[in-house]
Amino acid sequence: MSLVDDVAKQTLDAIRERGTHRRMRVLAGPQATRMEVDGRDCLLFAGSNYLDLAQHPEVTAAAAEAAEAHGCAAGGSRLITGNLDLHEALEAELAEFIGTEAALVFGTGYMANVGVIPALVGPGDVIVSDRLNHASIIDGARLSRARVEVIGHGDAGALEKVCSETRQAGRRVLLALDGVYSMDGHMPPLREMLSIAKHYDCMTLLDDAHGTGCLGRLGRGSGEHQDVLDLVDVHMGTLGKALGAFGAFVAGSALLRELLVNTARSFIFSCALSPPQVAAARAAVSLVRREPGRRVALQLRAKRLRDGLAAHGVSTAPSETQIVPVVIGDNASTMAVCEDLLERGFYAQGIRFPSVPEGTARLRITPMATHTDAEIDALTRALVEVLERRAPQVLGRTDDAGGVAGVSTAGRAHAGPPPSGV
Ligand code: PMP
């Protein structure tokens, strides 16, 4: 056995022992509410194509036309040959959409976070990070080599303490928050937390990967939903989830954009988004702006699911968005529930450590705007039946006691093995 295989085997054995070994399912067909999953026709409740735009005719036509007209690659990084007029147009549209001076697109949301954080803070500075923040914020913070102050989930008191202490010491401070927690489906108290940061003259970053397009009257996301966009300095949104395309963007001031073009390594040292991706994103932004009914429908579907499960005693706390978790607890039962549901033709992914804290494994259910009420109700019935058999303790739990609220004490892996989101 080669040394590489030896290392791989040892690590994989340890992962199996922990009950967190993963394999990739194979999906076939267009991204839609119904797909073939590992060869079985399923209703999909596991994706982030929340608004069902990935296969919208305007989006696919835009991508196809761009491929014909411009080819399939940007042919280099933005600073060399890759900066097409298409990128500039998309960025102007994104800035207008979010209501900022400027925007800059990145390869992915992960790349945006690991690019923007080290561009703003470095050794000697401080980043204040909620313990449930996404892995890409955690990794961006690590790369920056700034001191990371991990605060309890949504803990405004801890935030105030860190901000006042660090500002008194004359340090530069960046507060980074997820707008919608990707495994729990709830939002932090943004007004309270961002106001504290602003009071102490700290910089603020809102990672709205799951809010963009889904929340707010204009679809601007969690910041718009909570009416705090003016308190956000750096707005990160993704193009590969609700927008049904690929990539991500950072929106903010023109100076921030110029800073990122000059210093964000994941922007500078990486290929530009391809013309079909850019064109798809432009079409999707236009649809998000023109068709608010999609996000209204999405949140109604999610509410119907939460209410339906609650009627059977199943808690989805603290979800308040289209991400609906059912915490089961142990890894084996969670994956058994996931497999049983698949057999019945429903795909909702089981999520384990390190994506969520140990002991809080869960089914993460993500409805789409275009699921019908009948489909939501069918999933609810099937899930309740499966839970009766596999995890009866989950039924009858309608308070927060064993629900996701427990997450805040368990914490996410800011230290230790690298965490990973969906
Ligand atoms: N932030 C959050 C909160 C996320 O959930 C994700 C993706 N799961 C990302 C950032 C990364 O975005 P992308 O998938 O575009 O890399």
Image (cartoon, rainbow, N blue to C red):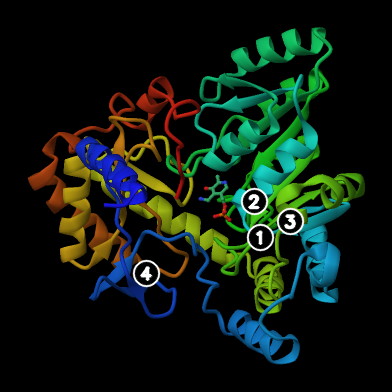
- Amino acid type at image mark 3: Phe
Q: Are marks 1 and 2 in contact (CB under 8 Å)?
A: yes
Residue 216 visible to the viewer: no
User: Picture coordinates of residue 55 (x, y %)?
Assistant: 52, 79
| Sequence-wise first label, 1 or 3 | 1
Q: Is residue 40 above or below residue 357?
A: below
Residue at numbered disc 1: 107
Mark 2 CB within 8 Å of ligand 1: yes
Secondary structure beneath dot 2 equals helix
Q: Label 4 vs label 3: CA separation? A: 44 Å
User: Picture coordinates of residue 337 (x, y %)?
Assistant: 18, 50
Q: Are marks 4 and 3 in contact (CB under 8 Å)?
A: no
Secondary structure beneath dot 4 equals loop
**Is residue 99 shown left or right of residue 409?**
right
Residue at numbered disc 4: 372
Secondary structure beneath dot 3 equals loop
Front residue (pair 20, 351): 20
Crowd band around label 1 with a 10 angstrom C-alpha radius: few (<14), some (14–19), many (20+): many
Mark 1 CB within 8 Å of ligand 1: no
Q: Quadrant of residue 285?
A: bottom right
**Is residue 218 shown left or right of residue 99?**
left
Q: Label 1 vs label 2: CA separation? A: 6 Å
Which residue is found at the position 55% from the left and 79% from the top?
Answer: 56
Secondary structure beneath dot 1 equals loop
Which residue is found at the position 47% from the left and 65% from the top?
Answer: 369
Crowd band around label 4 with a 10 angstrom C-alpha radius: few (<14), some (14–19), many (20+): some
- Amino acid type at image mark 1: Gly
Residue, far front: 2
- Amino acid type at image mark 4: Thr
Residue at numbered disc 2: 111
Point out the frontmost of discs 2 and 4: 2
Residue 289 visible to the viewer: yes
